[in-house]
Image (tube, rainbow, N blue to C red):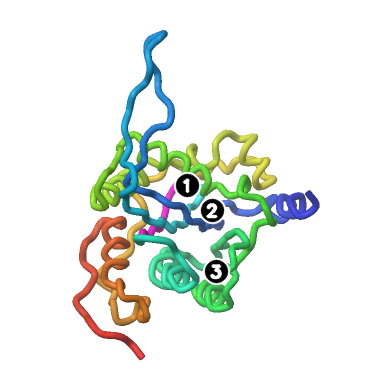
Amino acid sequence: MAQREEWRQLTAGLDLSRLVFVDETGAKTNMTRSHGRAEGGRRVVDAAPHGHWRTTTLLSSIRLDGSTAPMMIEGPTDAEVFREYVRQVLVPSLRPGDIVVMDNLTPHKSADVEETIRAAGADVWFLPPYSPDMNPAEQLWSKLKAFLRALKARTLDTLIDGVRDGLRLVTSSDVIGTGPRLQMLLGDPPSPTLRRAGPPATVACGSYRPTSCLPVKSDVHEVLRLACMVNGSTDVGSSSGHET
């Protein structure tokens, strides 16, 4: 409790537009609504794949105005993937003076990650331990997953399209909720400058090069293809080989 109170005091009076929250979540091709409505006495019937589906991880930042900088990969993430997300997707979206806020996941606390962010003129803050409720990214994931469950994507390409379309629906009110919620999270009244978000922030995917991203991975080109498709482009460059 003491650390949570210290966090609220730290953020009180802060320019909230500087805060950039980073988090990860998963999305699969077997997602289906878990609840529904039916006439009295009748069952709600739906279907979901059994035993065969594709699993992805979505990494994204989110500002309190609802804008995002996402990247999507197939399978789980690890420290190497997170470093490349920071270098190739997060950092191009940062502005000098931004504060990148993350939880205490081990890959987030890498010295390389902190150095890369600070080299872009931003600072790095970590949330109090065991405080996912203090990360507005949880509101982003909640809205996105509700959208994906309704979509019921059954192929990887459909899921990628769904993630992109779902992110474009996110607004500042989705992220921060009501004024009391924002005050609970950050110890500050809602900023009058927060506005409805437009489409997600995009990264110029033509600058991505398989030779410089995830050099020890066998699926480098696929990682970049997914990242660029979520950001609204399919251009991942044409280089091949590995960097030394």
The residue under label 2 is 17
The residue under label 3 is 107
Q: Are marks 1 and 2 in contact (CB under 8 Å)?
A: yes
Q: Residue at x 33, y 37 (%)?
A: 48
Q: Are marks 1 and 3 in contact (CB under 8 Å)?
A: no
Q: Nearer the viewer, residue 1 or 151?
A: 151
| Side (left or right) of 107 relative to 198 | right
- Return the x and y of residue 100 as percentages of the image width and height: 55, 62
- Return the x and y of residue 208 as percentages of the image width and height: 29, 73
- Indicate the quadrant containing the C terminus: top left, top right, bottom left or bottom right: bottom left
Residue furthest to the bottom in view is 244
Binning the other alpha carbons within 10 Å of mark 2 as few (below 14), some (14 to 19) or many (20 upward) gives some
Q: Nearer the viewer, residue 24 or 192?
A: 24
Q: Residue at x 39, y 49 (%)?
A: 27
Q: Amino acid at mark 2?
A: Ser
Binning the other alpha carbons within 10 Å of mark 1 as few (below 14), some (14 to 19) or many (20 upward) gives many
Badge 2 element: helix
Q: Are marks 3 and 2 in contact (CB under 8 Å)?
A: no
Mark linked to residue 65 = 1
| Side (left or right) of 227 relative to 181 | left
Q: Residue at x 41, y 41 (%)?
A: 145
Q: Amino acid at mark 3?
A: Pro
Determine the main secondary structure of the stretch shown in magenta: strand
Residue furthest to the top in view is 40
Question: Which region of the structure is painted magenta?
Answer: 65-72
CA distance for labels 1 and 3: 26 Å
Residue furthest to the left in view is 238
Q: Residue at x 39, y 71 (%)?
A: 88
Badge 1 element: loop
CA distance for labels 3 and 2: 25 Å
Judge depth for marks 1 and 3 and give the one in front: 3
CA distance for labels 1 and 2: 8 Å
